[in-house]
Image (cartoon, grey):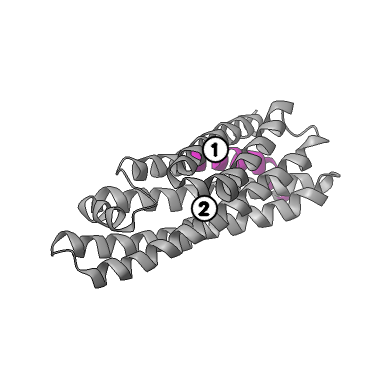
Amino acid sequence: MSQDNEMHAKIPSVTGIALILGSIIAITGFMLQQTLGLNPDDAATWLQSLGSNQDEATMGALLVTIGLLGWVVGVAGINSALQDTPGKVWASPGFLLICFAVISWAIIGQALVLTEIEYGAKLTGTAMDQQLVMAGGVAHSANVAITVLGSVSFGAGMILIGLALFHNHYSHEWLTYLAILVGLVAIIASLIIYPINAEISQLVTGFCFGGTVVWSVGMGIYRLR
């Protein structure tokens, strides 16, 4: 077998493993962050919670970053496989939108979380310093904004990936519909629910991420067969 053929044979395995492991690691980090009792509406409480649980918060941020970066490698494999199909019209822009979301969440967002942890740690060791609260609040507001923007981009990307899969025999039909559903829920949670109630939006987003894990594991197993 030539080197090119060997590489081509390995691509589905790499795609499948990246989708499965990446999504599981990312959701583990996300769940770890949620156990800290974070309230997106209350920056001061958020910062204090992060500062009081520095190890858990830092571990959560690292897991989210590692998992998402691994997961997007798997999505890249799907995009690559769809380039020889009519679905490439949807797959390419969908992949770019997902890449933007991953950069927003895994790099910018988690860097802001680490900044918030630093401010939170200072707050736990001193009286409620309003300057620290304001500085941490700026980082928190930026994190919320980038998270919402990333969620919208992710939702649009998943819808396009789902449409790309729709007319191709690349996956089971239910995985196609699940990708579109996850994308729609992500957009609704970010643009409609979040302005009304941030906590409910966070809960819906959690279920959305759970759906993404199911989709990723399903797609990963399909590629590993």
Which quadrant holds residue 87?
A: top right
- The amino acid type of the residue labelled 1 equals Cys
Q: Is residue 130 above or below residue 148?
A: below
Task: Report which quarter residue 9 is drawn in.
Answer: top right
Q: Residue furthest front?
A: 196
Asked if the magenta segment contains residue 171, the reply would be: no
Q: Position of residue 164 (x, y in %)?
A: 78, 42
Report the disc number at residue 58. none
Q: Residue furthest left?
A: 126
Marks 2 and 1, how far apart in space?
18 Å
Q: Which residue is mark 1?
A: 208
View extreme (right): residue: 86
Q: Residue at x 71, y 32 (%)?
A: 177
- Residue lying at 19% horizontally and 68% vertically, measured from the top left: 129
Q: Is residue 194 left or right of residue 42?
A: right
Nearer the observer: mark 2 or 1; the answer is 1
Residue at (69% x, 50% y) in the render: 3
Residue, disc 2: 69
| Residue 144 in sight from this viewpoint | yes
In which quadrant will I find the N terminus? top right
Q: Reading the chain from its start, which is encountered first: label 2 or label 1?
A: 2
At label 2, the amino acid type is Leu
Residue 71, image x, y percentages: 55, 46
Q: Secondary structure at mark 1?
A: helix
Residue in the foreground of this view, choosing between 153 and 217: 153
- Label 1, residues with CA under 10 Å away: few <14, some 14-19, many ≥20: many
Residue 1 visible in the shown view: no
Residue lying furthest bottom: 131
Task: Name the magenta segment's main secondary structure.
Answer: helix
Is residue 18 part of the magenta span, yes or no? yes
Residue 30 position, x and y percent, is 41, 44
The stretch in magenta equals 4-23
